Amino acid sequence: GFVGASASTRTEPRLDGRSPSDLSDDDVDMLLCSHNVLFPLSQTEEEIQTLRQVLLAKEKYASDVRRQLGLSPLSTMKQNLSRGWQDVQSSAPYVRTRDNLSHAGQVTSAALSNVGVAFTRRLAEMR
């Protein structure tokens, strides 16, 4: 039975992991009529409401602190994006790709320079 259940000839209904739709009509009747169930239920609902109020107050306080510190949602998003970009830039794949592209650029530049020198020589020879 339930904690604090009265000693009676009826057995108290128990969910035992069953969904409410699995309960018999007698179990549902006992749940609805039993003060032992309704009191903890209303007490739990009151506790939930109190916790919601406390959470709302804490969220408001945190929002006020962020505002006083100049931490707007936009500045927080900018910080997150900046931090994320720094993480990307320091990642091994990014560093490898950056270095490979830099090397490819240097090789291409050298090749174009050589083509330019050869072209200039050809033009000088043609005169």
Image (cartoon, rainbow, N blue to C red):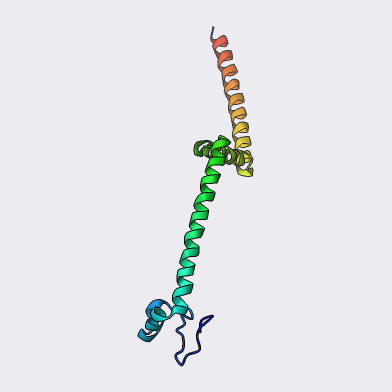
Q: Is residue 31 above or below residue 96?
A: below
| Residue 116 picture location, percent across and down | 57, 18
Q: Nearer the viewer, residue 35 or 90?
A: 35
- Residue at 53% x, 81% y: name it: 4
Numbered disc total: 0
On the image, which quarter does residue 118 sit in? top right
| Residue 74 picture location, percent across and down | 50, 37
- The residue sitting at the left extreme is 25
Q: Nearer the viewer, residue 100 or 90?
A: 90
On the image, which quarter does residue 38 sit in? bottom left
Q: Nearer the viewer, residue 86 or 21?
A: 21
| Residue 90 picture location, percent across and down | 64, 40
Quick check: 13 left or right of 106? left
- Residue at 54% x, 50% y: name it: 58
| Residue 106 picture location, percent across and down | 62, 28
Q: Nearer the viewer, residue 86 or 4?
A: 4
- Residue at 45% x, 84% y: name it: 13
- The residue sitting at the bottom extreme is 9
- The residue sitting at the top extreme is 127
Q: Is residue 82 above or below residue 41?
A: above
Q: What is the quadrant of the C terminus in the image?
A: top right
Q: Is residue 18 above or below residue 45?
A: below
